[in-house]
Amino acid sequence: VSTMDIKRIEFQQKFDQVNFMLSDLAIDHPLAIRVRAFLLQCEERERRSNYSTLFEDLSEQLQADLVEEIFASSLDKIAYFKSRSPEFRLAVFKAMRIAVFAPGERLCQPATLYLIINHGGLVGQDGRIHIRGSSMNKDFMLESWSQELFKPGVALTYVQVHCLTRDQMREICERFPADRKEITRARMRVRA
């Protein structure tokens, strides 16, 4: 039973190492608490990151079916991904990386789409609150995107997000010409 959840054991070992490091370096108590709290929030990220490795053992069709089952409702809310081919959406899923932000941290990577994936994750941005399933920076593909006009989000709770950069999206579009045409149309609608 103790070896059934390998990821949990690996995480516990990492947590023990961090505790030793904090003690060995005599880190102030308030900062040590913040580090431990953040690490606890990363346990789910570690588990989810392992899923992408498990996906690779499946056929392309099963991978695409799983992505549709898990992320269809979130992807359909974003004009760039709605009604795209399952292969395109699978490529988007594979390109996304998972990031964790602590309360008060800014989500400020330029030209990057953020999709909130954890229950209880809250992000404030430009007077709005984003919750699980919400996406931020839907204009990340626009050529006219500007750092001056960008309003970064701020994590109000611990939040996990899937991140996709404009460069990653461009590379995916190159591999899927039929979907690229629809992306161009969606970009024009977002711009309007």
Image (spheres, grey):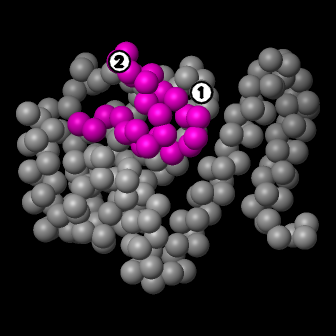
SS for callout 1: loop
User: Which residue is under mark 1?
Assistant: 157
First-in-chain label (1 vs 2): 2
Give the amino acid type for the residue marked by disc 2 in the picture: Asp
Look at the picture and state if 109 lies above or below 147: below
Asked whether residue 134 is in view, the answer is yes
State which quadrant residue 21 falls in: top right
**Residue 169 pos. (x, y %):** 28, 53
SS for callout 2: loop
Cα distance in 3D space between marks 1 and 2:
17 Å
Look at the picture and state if 39 lies above or below 2: above
For the C terminus, which image quadrant? top left
Q: Are marks 1 and 2 in contact (CB under 8 Å)?
A: no
**Residue 171 pos. (x, y %):** 26, 59
Look at the picture and state if 57 lies above or below 82: below
Residue 129 lies within the magenta run: yes
Asked whether residue 106 is in view, the answer is no
In front here: 85 or 105? 85
Density class for disc 2 (Cα within 10 Å; few <14, some 14-19, many ≥20) is: few
Residue 126: mark in rendering? 2
Residue 89 lies within the magenta run: no
For the N terminus, which image quadrant? bottom right
Left or right, 137 with reference to 49: left
State which quadrant residue 104 falls in: top right
Density class for disc 1 (Cα within 10 Å; few <14, some 14-19, many ≥20) is: some
Tell me which residue sits at (60%, 57%) in the image. Answer: 48
Tell me which residue sits at (54%, 65%) in the image. Answer: 52
Give the amino acid type for the residue marked by disc 1 in the picture: Thr
Magenta-colored span: 114-139
State which quadrant residue 109 falls in: top left
Tell me which residue sits at (52%, 72%) in the image. Answer: 55
